[in-house]
């Protein structure tokens, strides 16, 4: 069952940020205003967004007579210089279609409103370049319907389009509502769906990792989670596979993008590893710190005796309290001998000594902005019930 969950519907209907975009568009239409809908080039599940908005608007409007008319500007009316005439041809009939006379004292917008040319229609414009946006905005400035069924416009454009304030328009910006925490929640839902057998610590790490890598592109994140073997494979290898898939060839092709698939194709290992490192800092680093504290508690008698008998320095000062000891200091004193040829800190348990050394190595990697390998994460997580 878990394999067939419609994650695109979940993203747009059940995750707070994306659904806020849906609600904002619907509320704007209900308030009889046109919409400037700003979305990124790499918007996840674009068709599902339109479908969700439309279904919720129909429910709010409580009528089945409304229709959405999608116009792909680049395909249907490229370089259109007379938008009013184009709309009359598309949606007008008979004498009404031919009845407008330029120079007769009435704007074509008012003529269309009076004749209800766009009655019960939402005109959804997509595929627009900057010049197209300006032309359609100029037309829509004079189109101010007084009721929902008089016809309204949604102008879907790129997030980079400059902010414009018009009386009969409201801007809805995807990037202002959707953030990385929305994606992390979404990733957790996928991982908890019952299809994945990862232990809980791995799920926490994967949800954070995929969110930090993919930012707000839930579509790539879902594919990443489904196609990766996180316990044995480098995240960069999994991303490289997705970047070559036909379904994702257009992702990460926008100008000056930081999209994860663009970084993968360009071989930008530094930026990718930085995002992986951030996820490990969030999940692995606290575990290492908790184990440091537990190690000190387990061996407090030996550590306290060592502090009494030796002047243990750390960051230029003498340490008095065991809890202040960092892993590097603990590991050094547990593996080096004093003047009497005995270990400065004697830990009789070999497994504990090996674990201390391992924790120090992993903390040192993270402290120097390096990433732990999947194999070392397995070793780290395993002690915490994650076999």
Image (spheres, helix red, strand yellow):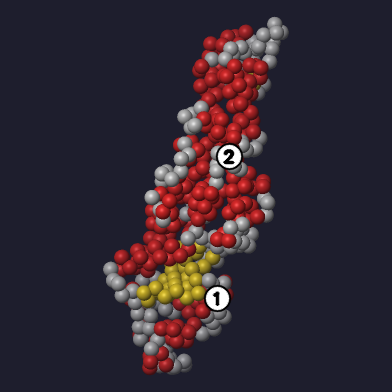
Q: Is residue 102 left or right of residue 292?
A: left
* Residue 31 disc label: none
Above or below residue 249? Residue 137 is below
Name the residue at 67% across, 46% down. Answer: 270
For this rendering, which residue is in front, 231 or 299? 231
Marks 1/2: CA distance? 45 Å
Residue 94 sits in quarter? bottom left
Q: Is residue 278 above or below residue 91?
A: above
Q: Is residue 171 above or below residue 313?
A: below
- Examine the image and state in which quarter residue 303 appears: top right
Observer-nearest of 340 and 8: 8
The local crowd at label 2, few if under 14, some if 14 to 19, many if 20 or more residues have their Cα within 10 Å, is: few
Q: Are marks 1 and 2 in contact (CB under 8 Å)?
A: no
Whether residue 135 is visible to the viewer of this picture, yes or no, is no
Q: Circle 2 sits in a helix, a strand or a loop, which is it? A: loop
Q: Residue at x 55, y 79 (%)?
A: 78
Which residue does the numbered mark 1 point to in the structure image?
A: 74
Crowding around mark 1 (Cα neighbors within 10 Å: few <14, some 14 to 19, many 20+) is: some
SS for callout 1: helix
* Residue 79 seen from this side: yes
Task: Name the residue carrying label 2.
Answer: 232
| Residue at 41% over, 56% down | 6
At which x and y percent is residue 325? Answer: 59, 20
Q: Residue furthest top?
A: 340
């Amino acid at each position: 069952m878990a394999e067939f969950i419609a994650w695109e519907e979940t993203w747009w209907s059940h995750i707070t940020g994306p659904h806020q975009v849906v609600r904002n568009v619907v509320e704007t239409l209900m308030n009889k205003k046109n919409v400037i809908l700003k979305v990124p080039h790499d918007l996840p599940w674009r068709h599902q967004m339109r479908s969700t908005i439309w279904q919720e608007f129909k429910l709010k409007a409580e009528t089945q007579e409304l229709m959405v008319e999608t116009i792909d500007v680049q395909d249907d009316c490229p370089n259109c210089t007379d938008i009013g005439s184009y709309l009359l041809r598309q949606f007008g009939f008979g004498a009404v279609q031919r009845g407008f006379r330029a120079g007769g004292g009435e704007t074509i917008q008012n003529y269309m409103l009076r004749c209800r040319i766009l009655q019960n229609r939402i005109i959804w414009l997509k595929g627009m370049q900057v010049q197209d946006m300006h032309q359609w905005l100029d037309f829509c400035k004079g189109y101010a319907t007084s009721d929902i069924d008089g016809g309204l416009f949604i102008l879907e454009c790129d997030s980079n389009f400059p902010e414009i304030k018009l009386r009969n328009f409201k801007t809805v910006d995807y990037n202002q509502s959707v953030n990385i925490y929305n994606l992390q929640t979404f990733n957790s839902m996928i991982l908890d769906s019952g299809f994945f057998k990862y232990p809980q610590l791995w799920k926490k790490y994967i949800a954070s990792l995929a969110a930090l890598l993919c930012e707000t592109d839930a579509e790539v994140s879902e594919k990443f989670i489904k196609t990766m073997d996180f316990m044995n494979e480098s995240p960069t290898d999994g991303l490289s596979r997705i970047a070559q898939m036909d379904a994702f060839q257009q992702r990460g092709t926008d100008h000056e993008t930081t999209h994860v698939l663009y970084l993968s194709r360009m071989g930008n290992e530094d930026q990718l590893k930085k995002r992986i490192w951030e996820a490990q800092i969030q999940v692995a680093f606290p575990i290492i710190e908790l184990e440091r504290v537990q190690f000190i508690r387990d061996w407090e008698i030996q550590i306290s005796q060592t502090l009494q008998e030796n002047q243990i320095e750390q960051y230029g000062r003498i340490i008095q309290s065991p809890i202040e000891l960092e892993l590097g200091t603990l590991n050094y004193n547990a593996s080096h001998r004093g003047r009497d040829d005995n270990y400065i800190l004697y830990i009789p348990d070999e497994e504990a000594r090996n674990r201390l050394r391992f924790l120090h190595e992993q903390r040192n990697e993270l402290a120097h902005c390096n990433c732990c390998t999947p194999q070392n994460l397995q070793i780290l997580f395993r002690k915490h019930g994650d076999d």
